[in-house]
Image: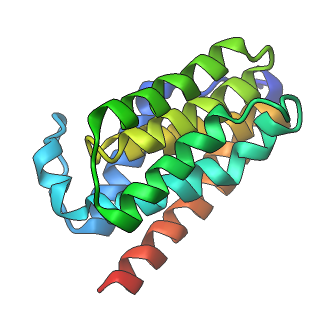
Amino acid sequence: MERESQRKLKPVALLRDVRRSVSEILGKPFSERIDHRLFQPDKKALALWAIDCAEHVLPLFEENYPCDKRPRKALETLKEWIDTGVFKMSVIRKASLDAHAAAKDAKEDYAKYAAHAAGQAVATAHVPTHALGSSVYAIRAVAAYSGNVDEGLIRERSWQLQRLRDITKNSN
């Protein structure tokens, strides 16, 4: 029998699973090929969800890198877009790339994944399906931090999907 710590997350399979669940929650058809335009009407809901996913794991980055504000700034940039509706690609791109650069600078996998979650989250302002990347990176952060794949796959994924259900219920 395979030991828990030896099990690995398969990011492609995880992304497919998250995509299927998000499609179901949003009432969108699921296909093997993602159609970004299909999710355009849900962009703000997905952005709110992406913030939740990233904020839930951001302490895993900030506990080791308290002076590095790049991932936090990415989420603040996304919140500003949600609040104002003002979209500036240069601002969104910089915030995203800065968060991803913070991930590259981090030493621990869980910290890297948490920073990547923030970088993907802010990119949701540009393409709504980047929210899926925020979700997947957050799940990977939890799994890497705990050393237990099921912590990410079951507990974190369940929490995330419930948050999306709550967001969509409240926005209707």
Q: Residue at x 73, y 41 (%)?
A: 142
Percent x, y of residue 62? 81, 38
Q: Residue at x 57, y 28 (%)?
A: 99
Between 74 and 91, the residue placed more toward the observer is 91
Numbered label tally: 0
Q: Residue at x 38, y 36 (%)?
A: 91
Residue 139 at least partly seen: no
Report the quarter where the N terminus lies: top right
60 w.r.t. 53: above or below: above
Q: Is residue 142 left or right of residue 23?
A: right
Residue 67 at least partly seen: yes
Looking at the image, what colour scheme do you see? Answer: rainbow
131 w.r.t. 51: above or below: above
Q: Residue at x 55, y 51 (%)?
A: 76
158 w.r.t. 31: above or below: below
Q: Is residue 90 left or right of residue 3?
A: left
Report the quarter where the C terminus lies: bottom left
Residue 42: quarter of image = bottom left
Percent x, y of residue 13? 43, 31
Between 20 and 137, the residue placed more toward the observer is 137
Between 89 and 153, the residue placed more toward the observer is 89
26 w.r.t. 74: above or below: below
Percent x, y of residue 83? 40, 67
Between 52 and 35, the residue placed more toward the observer is 52
Percent x, y of residue 93? 37, 29
